[in-house]
Image (cartoon, grey):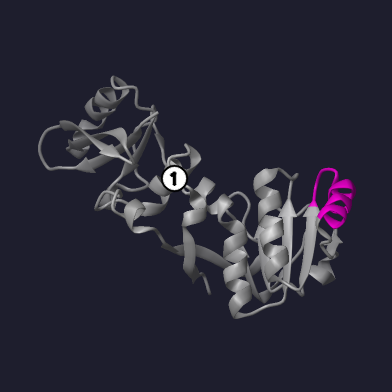
Amino acid sequence: MQFRCMIQRRYGIEVSERTLFGRPAVFVRQRRMCQRESARALLERGVDKVAFAGAEAGDSRMPSLREMDSVYLHTVLAGDVGAYVAERSGTTAACFFRTIGQIEEQAILRLATAFRYLMISIQRDSEAICRSLRRRYGLPVVEGPTPSQVRNADFALLFHPPERDMMLSERCLTFRPGEDAGHPTPGGMPITGLSLDVPPDVAGELPAGFQAEPILSEAAFRGWIDPNQIKINGISIDKA
């Protein structure tokens, strides 16, 4: 599958092919009124996913094509986000999962090396999973933390909304890799953006004018880059 990127031009539609991360990429210059024609041009080339440049980001108006997002990259880097917070302030982290897979386990292990206390809430097979984590890694985890325990967290990682109503403290920094309006973070200060340190060879591939994270996320998901090469060097916080 190829990268699909779109940039806007005032007149007409111009389709060109380049390479990104060694793979063919389709670029389209278009007028806003030519969305249908642009979508047709992309679909003819086997395109099913796009990224928009500049003001067009987040405004695809092409229901037949999906827009790239940063969810996968944020999910893979979730443990590193917590470790970044731990280096600056905080000793206690709380994690909320539906179940545990490889990515979730990697996040837990990263947090366990960064925080002194780790609380884990898992909706499925919680007891067995936490017992396995203690046995395999010797992690001092608190299984199924109570609301009062969660209130002590300095950082909260939410792969899934908590099973029951829990309020985080005002000082707690929270990160939800797949944040959406339907499941708002309960209290705390949401981390709304990441500042990334990207290797020069990877950064050199990113097209000018595009948001980097969705493209990096797609490349990581498809195995074109190693997300472990990407480091967190800053976060944005919603203090409202």
On screen, residue 133 versus residue 98, left or right, reads right
Residue sitting at x 36%, y 31%? 2
Residue sitting at x 86%, y 50%? 132
Residue sitting at x 18%, y 36%? 30
**Count of numbered circles in the view:** 1
On the image, numbered disc 1 is attached to which residue?
225
Residue 123: % across, % down? 80, 47
Residue 3: % across, % down? 35, 36
On screen, residue 63 above or below 108: above
On screen, residue 199 above or below 35: below
Residue sitting at the far left: 11
Q: Quadrant of residue 175?
A: bottom right
Magenta part of the protein: which range?
122-136
Q: Amino acid at mark 1?
A: Ile
Q: Secondary structure at mark 1?
A: loop
Q: Quadrant of residue 27?
A: top left
Question: Which quadrant: the N terminus?
Answer: top left
Near-viewer residue (29 or 110):
110
Crowdedness of circle 1 by 10 Å Cα count: few (<14), some, many (20+)?
some
Residue 138: % across, % down? 84, 61
Residue 3 part of the magenta segment: no
Residue 211: % across, % down? 34, 53
- Give the main secondary structure, helix, strand or loop, of the magenta stretch: helix
On screen, residue 238 versus residue 14, left or right, reads right
On screen, residue 145 versus residue 223, left or right, reads right
Near-viewer residue (123 or 10):
123
